Amino acid sequence: MSNSSSKIGRWIAAGLAMAVLISVFYNLVIDNMPKGEVRQVADYTPWSAATLAVAETLPLQNGGRIKPLSTFAGFSMLGLHGARSMEIKDSRGQTLKIKPTAWLMDSLFRPQLAIQLPTFRIDNSAVLEAIGVKARGKRDRYSYNDIEPGREKLVELAKTYEAIDKAKRDPVQTQVIDLAYNLRNYESLLGYFGFARFGVTLKGSGKDGAPDQHAEISAVMMTAPQIREQIAQSRGQGKGIEPHLQSMLEQVFDAANFAKFGLFILPPADPKTLTWLSAGDAIANAISDPKKDPQLGIADVKALEILARSVDDETAFRQQLSSLRDSLAKRAEVRGEYRHIQMEADYYQKNWFLNALVCFILGTVTALAMWTFGKGKAGRLLSWLTLASTATGLGICVYAIVNRCIIMQRPPVGNLYDTIIFIAATVVLISLVIEWMTRRRFALGIAPILGTLLIILARRFELGDAKDNMDPLVAVLNSNYWLTIHVLTITLGYAAGLLSAFLAFIYLLMRGLRLDNGDREIRRSLTRAVYGTICLTLFLALVGTVLGGIWANDSWGRFWGWDPKENGALLIVLWTLAILHARLGGYIRDWGLHFAAVFTGAVVTFSWWHVNFLGVGLHNYGFTAGKGTIWLFYIVIAAILVFGVVARAIEQNGKGRAAK
């Protein structure tokens, strides 16, 4: 009877686990995908791989650091489109996949095609209805052409809604504001090279009915000293600026304003100047600032004009783009700002964490099968497959984190996204160490599951945040020493606490579904593992909290300030201390220890994640929108505890009947 119950329990557990995985993937992949059809862009011609390879390593300044164009393109597309790729159909009905660099190149150099691409993700059709644009469904992606008829209404509504307190805005109002900002930012990309495409019209230059002539912006920049002198003479004589000159200057400054934002791709001549220039900056400086040498700016604008005009001949365009990239890279290298551009481009191109996720998913499937088939030959084979795939996923995570450290020139944890991938690697590593020490397969089985869940969480966070998490840290974190000894210690404590909660859940599930077939040894092994990880959590949280107080005293002039993040760390210390004292005092035994350890998961989540949503305190550097995942996790914790209580009651009832 016991063996039969154990087998049934194994199949129930495996079925529940698969149901959870399916629901996670449904939410991650299917539910978050817009339901519309693939957009057809009849005249679209893909960029060649050679051209995109050159463009990817073009350096630019964004978010306070120098990065490759591919990184800027990836996060720009993620913020607008909600993904790092889009699909369209050409005139033959062939499906084409457009990646971020190609999408950005279209926006900059082929705006007539870019405005037809489904760039904007709209999750609520009420936003479009509010601005008078016809929606195709509740959730879909739309092109600039689709939204442009409602642009004026959108801007008007956004200004009205911005006057409302942020906490009092409803979802539609918030999304209207976001769409208005997204549209404006995208327009800065579409119009960036307008100065190169249109130049200026020299009014009055046409003779005998001929059309007025055109001039390049770079040519006007060359005549800037003469223009300033002519304006000074006119003002000295009490006259206004001549109409033709006034018109030319208006066109030049309009072109400069369109190219002032979007891409800061020009390293300044002065090595002491940290801020790079946009094309608009170079134009405005040459025309209006006589103190600055305009020659470098003129050469830069001239090169950009040639580049934009050669877009119809991709071979010539690629040659000019290569020349521009090499020139800018050389200038950046002299300034010491080009060291990791190629590495970063490769990092995002390889998509390491997606590869790790694939390995963890494979390990999860084989782990579930391993638990289902038990200790036979099939179980042993599956255990080796689980170990191989999990170790491979861990190796990929570690390699990716090391790459990030080199690129960022700082320790691995500096923001909320960093903590997720670091904790993912840590819990998998500790699980494998526990497996090496116990050889009971429970730690081996949970390692890929935790890796899968945490990498999915990281991807969801990156999608929702849509920000480059390699950008420089806020000032309070700008200390590699304290990042290493305090933040890493605290984050390791989070990892140990979450692992203890998951191990305790396995214990409750095992006993509740009789997966262990009454094996006291495996129960003792699990209990020792949970006890050990609780001890590790206490040690790391306590040391990390003390180190954080030292840092706070150094940075803020006080050791402790009852900040929410500080209180969260203290909660972990106090809770784990209570568990260990209750265990040593005999107040809780096996069941009690595991119940307490499961609740540790909620305490750790509050400290690690939830305090970032409170919007208060000096540690509020990780705040982001969206709280559903946290509350779902708390609900899962509560459900696990309820399951454990019911399982214990059933077991105790069974023992009571057996005694009678």
Image: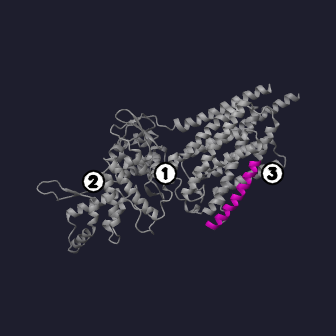
Q: How far apart, in angstroms, are the residues tagged by discs 1 and 3?
A: 51 Å
Measured as percent of width and height from the top left, residue 545 is found at 69, 59
Which residue is the site of mark 3? 581
User: Taking 479 as reference, is 160 above or below it?
Assistant: above
Q: How far apart, in angstroms, are the residues tagged by discs 3 and 2?
A: 76 Å
Task: State which tag comes first along the sequence, 1 or 2.
Answer: 2
Q: Taking the image as drawn, is residue 533 in sight?
A: yes
Task: State which tag comes first along the sequence, 1 or 3.
Answer: 1
Q: Which residue is drawn at 27% across and 53% down?
A: 198
Which mark is drawn over residue 198?
Answer: 2
Which residue is the site of mark 1? 345
The chosen color scheme is one colour
Image quarter (top left, top right, bottom left or bottom right) of the C terminus: top right
Looking at this view, is 637 or 285 the one in front? 285
Magenta-span inclusion, residue 27? no
Image quadrant assignment for residue 559: bottom right
Verify CB contact (< 8 Å) between mark 3 and mark 2.
no
Residue farthest along the right direction in this orientation: 660
At label 2, which amino acid type do we have? Phe
Magenta-span inclusion, residue 535? yes
SS class, disc 2:
helix
Measured as percent of width and height from the top left, residue 609 is found at 62, 50
SS class, disc 1:
helix
Task: State which tag comes first along the sequence, 3 or 2.
Answer: 2
**Which mark is nearer the camera, 3 or 2?**
2
Measured as percent of width and height from the top left, residue 356 is found at 59, 43
In the image, the segment drawn in magenta is 532-556
